[in-house]
């Protein structure tokens, strides 16, 4: 499995999945952002995704967002990030995403349900963005890869997975 998660220390993919060493290939970015694919302009994120899909031959790629996400929260609230220009520029990959401020049917972040809904919608956007990567598109077309969206509640440890049939995040 290839896990794309936030760099927040409360999100530990091996603990969430019960994976043992060698069973999980991780990509951790602030806000679990998958940058747009740009041919001829490789990024570390693109290289990590390509390596997992092409070299390791993972069968599942999971994008996992989480409750109380500072990155998505900053986007939802429209925080002023001028003091942290690298963070501001990184989050710009998601700032134009209109779904970050949308609503989700299973928002469970009781402190700020708007952020929870934004995180869940953000996960779905990252899954769509993954489809623009040629290696992902090819493996999907061959039926050799599944893209999965998860929402992790940091205070309870519960995980919800997006189900296309209901268009909702449901308990695993």
Image (cartoon, rainbow, N blue to C red):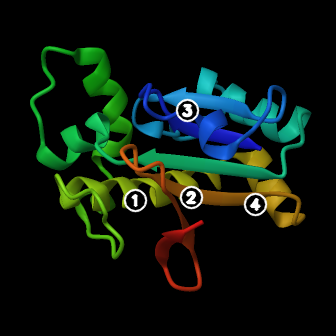
* Residue with the mark numbered 3: 12
Q: How crowded is mark 1: few (under 14 residues within 10 Å), some or many (20 or more)?
A: many
- Looking at the image, residue 159 lies above or below residue 34: below
* Residue with the mark numbered 1: 120
Element type where label 3 sits in the image: loop
Q: In this image, 118 relative to 148: left or right?
A: left
Quarter of the image with the C terminus in it:
bottom right
Element type where label 2 sits in the image: strand
**Closest to the observer: 156 or 62?**
156
**Is mark 1 in CB contact (under 8 Å) with mark 2?**
yes
x and y percent of residue 121 in the render?
Answer: 38, 61
* Residue with the mark numbered 2: 149
Q: Which of marks 3 and 2 is nearer the N terminus?
A: 3
Residue at the extreme bottom of the image, as rendered: 165
Which callout, 1 or 3, points to the residue nearer the camera?
3
Which callout, 3 or 2, points to the residue nearer the camera?
3
Distance CA(mark 4)–CA(mark 1): 18 Å
């Amino acid at each position: 499995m290839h896990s794309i998660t936030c760099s927040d220390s409360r999100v530990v993919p091996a603990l969430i999945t019960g994976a043992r060493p060698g069973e999980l290939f991780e990509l951790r970015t602030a806000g679990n952002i998958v940058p747009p694919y740009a041919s001829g302009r490789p990024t570390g994120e693109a290289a990590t995704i390509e390596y997992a899909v092409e070299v390791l031959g993972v069968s599942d790629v999971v994008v996992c967002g989480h409750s109380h996400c500072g990155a998505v929260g900053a986007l939802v609230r429209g925080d002023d990030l001028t003091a942290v220009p690298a963070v501001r520029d990184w989050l710009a990959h998601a700032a134009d995403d209109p779904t970050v401020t949308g609503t989700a049917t299973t928002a469970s972040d009781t402190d700020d349900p708007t952020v929870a809904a934004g995180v869940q919608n953000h996960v779905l956007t990252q899954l769509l963005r993954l489809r623009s990567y040629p290696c992902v598109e090819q493996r999907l077309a061959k039926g050799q890869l599944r893209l999965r969206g998860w929402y992790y509640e940091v205070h309870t440890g519960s995980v919800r997975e997006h189900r296309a049939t209901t268009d909702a995040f449901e308990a695993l």
